[in-house]
Image (tube, grey):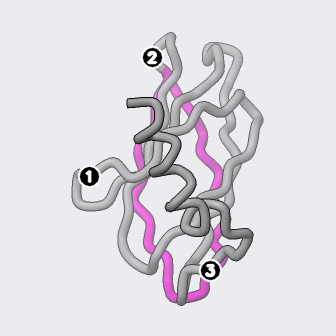
Amino acid sequence: MKIFILITLILNFPLWASDKVVPLKDASALHGKILGNKKCAGPAVIWISKKAEILYQVEVPINGSFEFHLVPGDYDIAATTSNSCQVKKSFTVAKNESKTIEIKLAK
């Protein structure tokens, strides 16, 4: 079994060891900051979804920043903390757009 795995890795080396990163055509970026008041204990968990399908989930400290690279379209962003501060927003990114948003958590 170990030999099979080793041979598989060696044969597929050119596929996973490539240093070329192909940019996503017409990709957009969402930049943002997560803000909270004194009642909101961090960190916050942020979800990016499209048509109720979660695409990204990250943990960000309160007053921290985030960045997502997305294809053009309509999305939802939701954030919550362990002590129930939360927010949900919808947004749209256009082709080659760089959008900036602030997420203000509230209890």
Residues at discs 1 and 3 in contact (Cβ within 8 Å): no
Query: Which element type, helix, strand or loop, lies under badge 1?
Result: strand
Which numbered disc, 1 or 3, marks the residue closer to the eye? 3
How packed mark 3 is, by other alpha carbons closer than 10 Å (few <14, some 14-19, many 20 or more), is few
Amino acid tagged 1: Glu
User: Residue sitting at 50 percent across and 22 percent down?
Assistant: 85
User: Residue sitting at 41 percent across and 41 percent down?
Assistant: 4
Q: Mark 2 or mark 3: which comes first in sequence?
A: 3
Q: Which residue is mark 1?
A: 53
Q: 85 or 75: which is nearer to us?
A: 75
Q: Is residue 64 above or below residue 71?
A: above
Q: 67 or 1: which is nearer to us?
A: 1
Q: Please provide the residue range marked out in magenta.
A: 85-107
- Alpha carbons under labels 1 and 3: distance apart: 25 Å
Q: 37 or 23: which is nearer to us?
A: 23
Snapshot quadrant of residue 22? bottom right
Q: Mark 2 or mark 1: which comes first in sequence?
A: 1
Which numbered disc, 2 or 1, marks the residue closer to the eye? 1
- The residue furthest front is 3
User: Residue sitting at 76 percent across and 34 percent down?
Assistant: 63
How packed mark 2 is, by other alpha carbons closer than 10 Å (few <14, some 14-19, many 20 or more), is some
How packed mark 1 is, by other alpha carbons closer than 10 Å (few <14, some 14-19, many 20 or more), is few
Amino acid tagged 3: Val
Magenta stretch encompasses residue 80? no
Q: Position of residue 74 (x, y in %)?
A: 36, 71
Q: 64 or 7: which is nearer to us?
A: 7
Q: Which residue is mark 2?
A: 84
Residues at discs 2 and 1 in contact (Cβ within 8 Å): no
